[in-house]
Image (cartoon, helix red, strand yellow):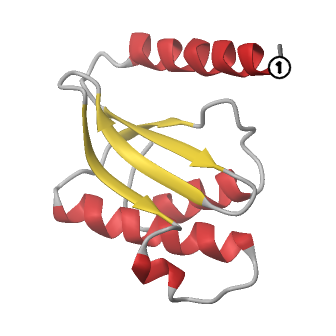
């Protein structure tokens, strides 16, 4: 029952973002678990992932940080660097069903500081 509510909320938020997306901006999605966090930039028109970063990658796993918020910072920095290499600056932020609080907010703020606009 709870899973159905989560899926419905995810779809509802995503559909609202797609309706607003009249300028063909890209969508930045965030997914997190109890230990890891990942983010990706998706082109909804072509249904392709353009840039992605995760705390499960080798480069970020080598950094042994005890705080999960530190992982969010490193994931955001790597995603921003990869996006700027591909000339991606404007995106829509799709937080999924997560509240804009804690690690999600930290990830978004770090992305803004590193050059992405949303």
Q: Residue reaching furthest right? A: 1
Q: Pick whichever, 71 or 76, lies toward us.
A: 71
Quadrant of the snapshot with the N terminus: top right
Q: Pick whichever, 64 or 43, lies toward us.
A: 64
For image coordinates 75% across by 56% down, the residue present is 34
Vertical position of residue 75 compared to residue 44: above or below? below
Residue 40 in view (yes/no): yes
Quadrant of the rendered structure where residue 10 is?
top right
Quadrant of the rendered structure where residue 79 is?
bottom left
Q: Percent position (x, y) of residue 110?
A: 54, 65
With 109 as the anchor, is 67 left or right in this view? right
For image coordinates 75% across by 21% down, the residue present is 3
Residue 113 in view (yes/no): no
Q: Percent position (x, y) of residue 42?
A: 32, 37
Q: Pick whichever, 56 or 28, lies toward us.
A: 56
For image coordinates 35% across by 44% down, the residue present is 41
Mark 1: secondary structure: helix
With 54 as the anchor, is 80 left or right in this view? left
Q: What number of labels is visible?
A: 1
Residue on which disc 1 sits: 2
Quadrant of the snapshot with the C terminus: top left
Q: Percent position (x, y) of residue 109?
A: 58, 59
């Amino acid at each position: 029952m709870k899973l159905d509510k989560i899926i419905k909320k995810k779809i509802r938020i995503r559909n609202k973002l797609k309706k607003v997306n009249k300028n063909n901006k890209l969508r930045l999605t965030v997914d997190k678990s109890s230990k890891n966090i990942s983010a990706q930039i998706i082109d909804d028109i072509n249904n392709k992932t353009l840039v992605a970063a995760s705390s499960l990658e080798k480069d970020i796993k080598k950094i042994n940080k005890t705080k999960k918020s530190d992982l969010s910072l490193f994931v955001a920095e790597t995603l921003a660097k990869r996006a700027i290499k591909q000339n991606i600056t404007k995106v829509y932020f799709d937080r999924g069903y997560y509240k804009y609080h804690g690690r999600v907010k930290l990830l978004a703020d770090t992305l803004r500081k590193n050059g992405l606009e949303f």
